[in-house]
Image (cartoon, rainbow, N blue to C red):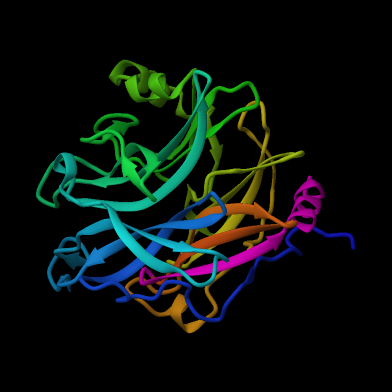
Amino acid sequence: MEQHQGAVRAYRLSDRPVVEASSVPGYEPIFNAGLLVHQGVYHLFARGVRSGYRRNDADGPRFLDYVSDVLVFESEDGLAYEFKYVLAHAGLGGTYAIEDPRVQRVRSNGDQHIVMTYTNLMANDGDAPWRIGMHELVYEAGRFCLVDAPPRVIGPPGVPNKDGVVFNLADGKVALLHRVYPNIQIAVFDSIQRMAAADGRYWRHHLKDIDRHTIITPSAGALAAGAGAPPVTTDEGHVLFFHERREDGTYTMNVALLDSKTGRVRHRLDDPLLAPELTWERVGDADNVVFVQGAHKRNGQIYLTYGAGDRCVGAAAVDVDQLLGALMASG
């Protein structure tokens, strides 16, 4: 059946979260989870906020003592997840909190690497803004482990920067999507090592010409956009699921098709694929939030994981052919 722009929608795989808040002792919100399917098992890398945080009634951040680690869950089917271990603790390398991990396979210098990117948040009383942290991971003895500690920090120094996603272009180069408010930018490197080693001089040139590096700006009625899940490779290009924050504070799941050679947007749907509808998406520590972070192609679908209400994790899917048809018809 012909699909018109905006007609396609992602559908929820369950009317309940696949990972509930407070399902792991010592943690309350568990949300914004990256995904990697490894050896047939779904590995969910979730942001877990330690118990004991509280709302702030004064000026400043919304919550106090809001410290998050990376928790790993596993599932055979992407629906029934079981907590396994804590992968990374806040405090590593002076990091106050580790937020919103994405995990991706990336080729570099002839080898395949597993890379976790995340928002590296320093202490509230410090001068450092949001920045992108990066770790390489290795799978051994039945679990993922951090290869490098302390973490590498990538992106322009001293500039608030987050939503880092790493992927390969068709020629094997390594692309980094990042968000200097309010847009999504792209930076391209010969290797992961070159990306990690990019210094202030490189990033000053990047920022000076930031309009040329910007690939997505917020749509009408939105304040900001940010990369969500690592792009999914298809014959038509890379499918990028990203989030938008609307003027009323609502977060939605959106999608664009990137050129496989340049990483630039070829097509984009105006309407969101998913918006907050269920109670646990509409009511939480942050109301009206679906925040996509994981994507995996399987059996003619793309399986998606998303944070909901800054409290828990949901799962959804979208038909690949329908989605590509809608994107290609979007002009």
Question: In this view of the protein, which residue sits in the foreground, 5 or 93?
Answer: 93
* Image coordinates for residue 82, horizontal then vertical, percent: 41, 69
Quadrant where the N terminus sits is bottom right
Quadrant location of the C terminus? top right
Q: Is residue 183 visible?
A: no
Q: Is residue 161 above or below residue 222?
A: above
Compared with 146, 28 (above or below) is: below
In the rendered image, residue 205 lying in the magenta stretch gets the answer no
Residue at 41% x, 60% y: name it. Answer: 32
Q: Residue furthest front?
A: 141
The residue lying at 51 percent from left, 33 percent from top is 106
Q: Which residues are magenta?
A: 310-331
Q: Nearer the viewer, residue 243 or 143?
A: 143
In the image, farthest residue toward the left: 125
Left/right placement of residue 191 relative to residue 27 reads right
- Residue 307: x and y in percent read 44, 65
Q: Return the x and y of residue 228 as percentages of the image width and height.
A: 50, 51
| Residue shown at the point (50%, 70%) measured from the top left | 314
156 sits to left or right of 183: left
Judge by depth and name the residue closer to the eye, 218 or 41: 41
Q: Is residue 49 left or right of residue 234?
A: left
Q: Can you name the residue that lies furthest to the right here?
A: 1
Residue furthest to the bottom in view is 279
